[in-house]
Image (tube, coloured by chain):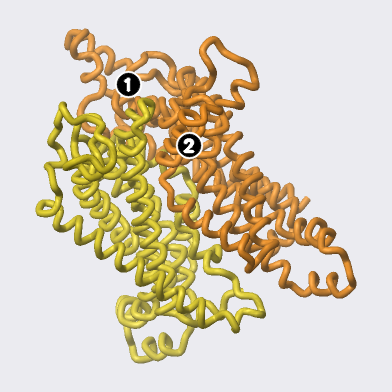
Chain colours: A yellow, B orange
């Protein structure tokens, strides 16, 4: 997914020669950005966790008498959908599904990708070549095709989304972490560990990993944002989370059916929720990068 | 000579990738739980008839024989017979594939034109308001769900303003080229969205980097007009990376196209594949996967060749 490419392509503004004067202000802005991101994420996670207690209605309860209530209706703050289900309640419960799927998948992809990168970085050129070539093939292969095959094998569901996300994200994680790991190769501390007789696993996990873990965390954080967007599209397509479970992607596709009758907000609201979460995680990722690695910004061209 | 050798080396490299893709596709197809043939025919056929159908699909043979038969079918028998529709897979997929290709080409065109345009506007106004504004658009846009973006476009331009058709590929009764273009605008834009913004980002970065390079400073000190520097020198230097990234983003674009087909009821390969998922028609999906994979590899190869011709220095590096 192209969504993940901000690491490599310099979404962080390139700083020309005249930058120093503007630096303090820009740093402050970064901090506000991180604060906003943390607040958004914290609130949404909390809402998702507390869904059973704060959702005003049962997200699955249809109410034939109250279909298509507009925004701000009495008793239904965000209106109701084509079956009269309360949209606010569905958004709250849907966040639970969507966030959980994105978290699990991003975490798994980050772990797998990092492990591959560590192994590729420290086990000889042949192994590295094999892993990185495989990654190259996986890299830009249309993920949707993989998702379709997974959907065929495992039946559509959240599991398909998680697998597809892992497949989509692992190449990116591997490549980013590999670049970091490669830089550690040949450093003195590695040599020191080797000369003290440390084995490969010990070097990888006790020496190299602590030195690259901050980059991994930064990348993994940004990943959640991109993946929640992707998973919502997959679920909207019908090969992800299945009805009647409330899920943001699913809500978008259910809203798609009623858009022709002018009820845009049924699809609009879950989409905005996805956008909000995605932006928040990206801001957080960018902010964390600055916290963990202030040098990186200077080193950029 | 160098270029030719490079191209043939790349061609040789494609073969093992295709073999891997075909084996994976085949294996995954056979992992399908349940019995798709049984499910398809159990209401209409007797047990003996179903067994006969299974025999006709060669399901009694050892797996490696089945694989070889299937590869043979890909070349000679149109990819085997679809389980749900009974016809040759490629004869079902081909018209859909052409429709998808039309949408993809439109997507690529939109992606390149607007991606470079946004990137150039931002890059040439680096640090100014216009740059920040463009980058904000890029940041927000990159976080949009393609499916949702398509819906919002439909709502604004087809339902509210009624400038463009809501969905489908042609108006009832057909309507020539202009009609097709009108139907292409919204899905093309939605499908191109993500790839377009990636391209915009790279274009901007390229222009900013080149603008800060020594040769541009030299030209500027010699009093060369800005327009000339940008058009003739910066433009030429960022052309190869732009082509390269466009090629790399084809995968993203194909994914976008398949999402979008579902939103706009585009009669393409994505629609066929999704229907096949529900019908458990693994023969059709296997054929579709191989078809898309082939296209993808061809596009990559072409990109490589074009980049190689544009910038031979990269090869030596």
Q: Quadrant of residue B106?
A: top right
What distance separates the C-alpha of mark 2 from that of mark 1?
47 Å
Chain where mark 1 sits: B
Label 2: how many residues lie within 10 Å, few (<14), some (14-19) or many (20+)?
some
Q: Are marks 2 and 1 on the same chain?
A: yes
Where is residue B209 drawn, in percent x and y?
Answer: 67, 68
Q: Position of residue B70 (x, y in %)?
A: 41, 27
User: Toward which corner of the image does residue A219 lie, by quadrant?
Assistant: bottom left
Give the chain letter at badge 2: B
Taking the spot 40% from the left edge, 51% from the top edge, the residue there is A168
Residue sitting farthest toward the front: A74
Residue sitting at x 38%, y 68%:
A284
Q: Is residue B262 above or below residue A49?
A: above
Residue B129 in the image, given as x and y percentages of width and height: 61, 64
Residue A136 relative to residue B226: left or right: left
Q: Answer with mark 2 or mark 1, whichever residue precedes in sequence.
A: 1
Q: Tell me, yes or no, if residue A2 can be seen here.
A: yes
Quick one: B228 or B55, which is closer to the camera? B228
| On screen, residue A44 above or below B90 | below
Neighbours of disc 1 within 10 Å: few (<14), some (14-19), many (20+): some
Q: Secondary structure under badge 2?
A: helix
Q: Is residue B199 above or below residue A28?
A: above
Question: Which one is closest to the eye, mark 2 or mark 1?
Answer: 2
Q: Is residue A58 left or right of residue B244?
A: left
Contact check, label 2 and label 1, Cβ < 8 Å: no
Q: Which residue is mark 2?
A: B153
Q: Which residue is mark 1?
A: B58
Of the 4 image quadrants, the one containing the C terminus of chain A is: bottom right
Say which of B236 and B212 sits in front. Answer: B212
Residue B44 sits above or below residue A1 on the image? above
Whether residue A139 is visible here, answered yes or no, is: no
Q: Mark 1 falls on what kind of element?
A: loop
């Amino acid at each position: 997914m192209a969504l993940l490419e901000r690491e490599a392509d310099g979404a962080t503004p390139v700083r020309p020669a005249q930058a120093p004067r503007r630096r303090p202000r820009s740093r402050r802005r970064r901090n506000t950005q991180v604060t906003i991101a943390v607040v958004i994420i914290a609130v949404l996670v909390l809402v998702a966790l507390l869904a059973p207690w704060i959702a005003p209605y049962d997200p699955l309860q249809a109410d034939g008498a109250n279909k298509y209530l507009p925004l701000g209706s009495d008793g239904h703050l965000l209106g109701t959908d084509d079956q009269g289900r309360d949209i606010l309640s569905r958004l709250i419960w849907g966040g639970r599904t969507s966030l959980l799927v994105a978290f699990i998948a991003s975490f798994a992809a980050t772990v797998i990708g990092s492990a591959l990168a560590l192994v590729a970085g420290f086990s000889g050129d042949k192994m590295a070549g094999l892993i990185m070539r495989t990654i190259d093939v996986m890299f830009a292969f249309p993920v949707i095709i993989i998702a379709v095959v997974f959907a065929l094998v495992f039946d559509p569901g959240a599991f398909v989304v998680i697998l597809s996300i892992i497949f989509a994200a692992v190449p990116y994680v591997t490549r980013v972490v590999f670049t970091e790991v490669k830089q550690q190769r040949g450093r003195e501390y590695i040599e020191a560990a080797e000369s003290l007789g440390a084995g490969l696993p010990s070097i990888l996990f006790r020496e190299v990993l602590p030195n690259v873990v901050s980059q991994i965390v930064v990348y993994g954080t940004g990943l959640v944002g991109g993946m929640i967007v992707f998973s919502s599209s997959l679920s909207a397509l019908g090969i992800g989370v299945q009805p009647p479970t409330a899920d943001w992607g699913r809500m978008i596709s259910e809203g798609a059916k009623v858009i022709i009758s002018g009820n845009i907000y049924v699809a609009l609201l879950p989409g905005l929720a996805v956008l909000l979460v995605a932006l928040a995680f990206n801001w957080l990722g960018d902010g964390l990068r600055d916290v963990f690695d202030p040098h990186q910004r200077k080193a950029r061209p | 000579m160098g270029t030719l050798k490079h191209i043939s080396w790349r061609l040789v490299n494609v073969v093992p990738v295709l073999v891997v893709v075909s084996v994976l596709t085949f294996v995954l197809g056979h992992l399908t739980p349940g019995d798709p043939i049984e499910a398809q025919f159990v209401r209409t056929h007797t047990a003996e008839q179903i067994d006969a159908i299974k025999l006709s699909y060669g399901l009694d043979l050892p797996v490696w024989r089945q694989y070889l038969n299937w590869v043979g079918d890909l070349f000679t028998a149109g990819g085997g017979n679809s389980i749900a529709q009974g016809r040759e897979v490629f004869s079902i997929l081909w018209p859909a594939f052409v429709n998808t290709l039309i949408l993809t080409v439109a997507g690529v065109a939109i992606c390149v034109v607007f991606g470079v345009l946004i990137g150039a506007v931002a890059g040439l106004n680096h640090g100014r308001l216009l740059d920040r504004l463009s980058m904000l658009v890029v940041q927000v846009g990159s976080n949009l769900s393609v499916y949702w973006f398509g819906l919002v476009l439909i709502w604004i331009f087809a339902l509210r303003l009624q400038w463009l058709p809501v969905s489908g590929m042609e108006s009832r009764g057909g309507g020539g080229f202009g009609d097709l273009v009108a139907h292409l605008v919204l899905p093309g834009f939605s499908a191109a969205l993500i790839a377009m913004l990636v391209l915009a980002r790279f274009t901007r970065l390229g222009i900013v980097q080149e603008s800060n390079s020594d040769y541009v400073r030299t030209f500027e000190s010699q009093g060369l007009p800005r327009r000339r520097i940008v058009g003739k020198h910066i433009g030429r230097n960022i052309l190869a990376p732009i082509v390269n990234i466009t090629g790399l983003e084809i995968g993203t674009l194909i994914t976008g196209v398949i999402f979008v087909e579902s939103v706009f009821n585009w009669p393409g390969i994505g629609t066929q594949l999704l229907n096949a998922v529900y019908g458990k028609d693994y023969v059709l999906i296997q054929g579709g996967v191989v078809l898309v994979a082939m296209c993808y590899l061809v596009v990559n190869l072409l990109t490589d060749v074009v980049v190689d011709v544009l910038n031979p220095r990269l090869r030596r590096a």
